[in-house]
Amino acid sequence: MDDFDDCAPCAAEDTSPAPMERGHVNRRDFIRITALATTGAALAGSLPTQVFADDSEEIADSLHLQEATIAQLQAAMASGRLSAQTLVDRYVDRIKRLDRGGPHVNSVLEVNPDAQEIAEQLDKERKQKGPRGPLHGIPILLKDNVDTHDRMQTTAGSFALFGTPAARDATVAARLRQAGAVILGKTTLSEWANFRSTHSSSGWSGRGQQCRNPYVLDRNPCGSSSGSGAAPSANFCAASIGTETDGSIVCPATANGVVGIKPTLGLTSRAGVVPISHNQDTIGPHARTVADAAAVLSAIAGGSDPRDPMASGPVLDYTQFLKKDGLKGARVGVARTNGFGSSPKADAIIEEAIKAIKDAGATVIDPANIPTQSKLGGQTELTVLLFDFKQDLKAYLANRVGVPIKTLADAIAFNEAHASTELKWFGQEIFLRAEATTNLNDPVYTAALALSHQLSREQGIDAVMNQFNLDALVAPTGSPAWTTDLVQGDHFTTASSTPAAQAGYPIVTVPAGFSFGLPVNISFIGRAFSEPTLIGLAFAFEQATKARRVPKFQATIPLPLP
């Protein structure tokens, strides 16, 4: 491959808050740019020892950017104390100071060069017609696997998708625009949504390098939606959009101490999103509060989409289910075999959370174990994902022009040709296994898919919820964040996302407590399209506990000296 037409310089080379203008990049320039990105990754390992002060300035009157909710921001704009333009400026300035400078969280891959102009038009519209709804003028970041038809790239973190921007918005991006949101930019993610290597570091990509955890910078932000979890936690946006195949919304939520909603399969359209599996991929919000996450979900969820045949579900205002007494009279089961037992620190926090659920008036059935838990995940799930990825990626790439690849085989070859940039830290073992699959009519695939659904749905989550007449199951979302390790890869200890991932069922995860300054969330898991119930339970828990803390960008957890 001699050159790349219509490419822009790499975001890793850009030190301003806005991305550089698109222009022609030949092969020599591409190599130079990626060499700079690789050098940046090596320098990233040198962390300062101090805690970075968060000097968030006042927005208007008594309202501060830090921890401001969507409702508060909307009220300030309605009263004339704040404009969308000012809000965009403040978030961009904060990204410049704290994400790209200072502690260098590296959660924002690219800032939308048109964000200020979009905000200006929305301010004019507000004055002339009033707001479109709760998201009018609200800045939201999108994971960099969500297509936007603008001057931004959509790359899934890989230079193999770097080139001409997408020809059309993803459906979720279009719906956010229709709701009046300002798409502020794209977030850093695990390259190819963490479906490239068995030894990867979550939050690393060839294009974006390593995202950090805003609580403790040398800790991992978890999951492929790493930047989408870190950015709202660090108050770089009002909310963000992440994607999940198995854990990549809920794990970044727990690692970064924010709310995450992993919706029912198909409740949000996957059209225009770089895929892994049409049988497990979902799109959902990260936010600092359940109310904010519910507001974003209301804008992107429900209805049909000709671009995603599986898109379905009700069109609802999910904020109507936010009730402080939502746990009173609820029946909640504790899934003791799902995520417990591997992290004593997470277990201790969840035990306190279970007590809070009881104190809020719920009946707790403990244990309420998923009967098939030991049979979930593993080769059955992986077989489905490997077959789906090869076919789904080809279908997605058919709608992208001006990028270097058209198939998974092309992506593999691209990585091999640019190994110093793309394969420096870990390989592409999963890519190679997916490329070796046949097609979706293969009996190996159809049997694995049927078994996956059977074990996770009627014999799994549905079975235990029917047995005990439950409104939800609860489990630890994950463990406290591990130290980022590009040499050995991720150090997962526990997670509870797999049953709902295979079933295509929803999870709402909420901050529950802290261990040594690192957050741990509790997951509320339910049946298909039970988001109203889960949001109600999660909101009541949040209001009863108020566990979230503001991250302080601590460099590391100091080791005690003898």
Image (tube, helix red, strand yellow):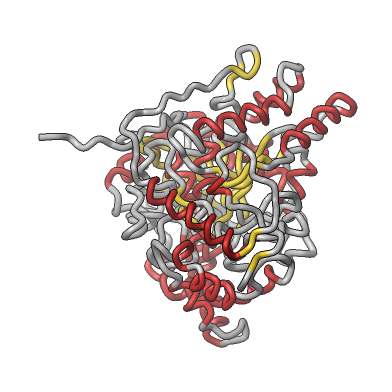
The residue that appears at 67% across and 25% down in the rendered structure is: 73
- Name the residue nearer the viewer: 152 or 267: 152
Q: Give the number of callouts.
A: 0
Query: From what the image shows, is residue 56 above or below residue 325?
Result: above
Residue farthest toward the left in the current orientation of the protein: 562
The answer to whether residue 333 is visible is no
Q: Position of residue 273 (x, y in %)?
A: 66, 59
Q: Quadrant of residue 72?
A: top right
- Name the residue nearer the viewer: 427 or 145: 427
Q: Quadrant of residue 136?
A: top right
Q: Which quarter of the image is occupied by the N terminus?
A: bottom right
Residue farthest toward the front in the current orientation of the protein: 28
The residue that appears at 74% across and 67% down in the rendered structure is: 399
Residue farthest toward the top in the current orientation of the protein: 61
Q: Position of residue 439 (x, y in %)?
A: 61, 84
Q: Which quarter of the image is occupied by the C terminus?
A: top left
Query: From what the image shows, is residue 102 above or below residue 33?
Result: above
Q: Position of residue 220 (x, y in %)?
A: 39, 47
Horizontal arrangement in the rendering, residue 534 relative to residue 345 (left or right): right
Q: Position of residue 515 (x, y in %)?
A: 32, 37
The answer to whether residue 253 is visible is yes
- Name the residue nearer the viewer: 212 or 310: 212
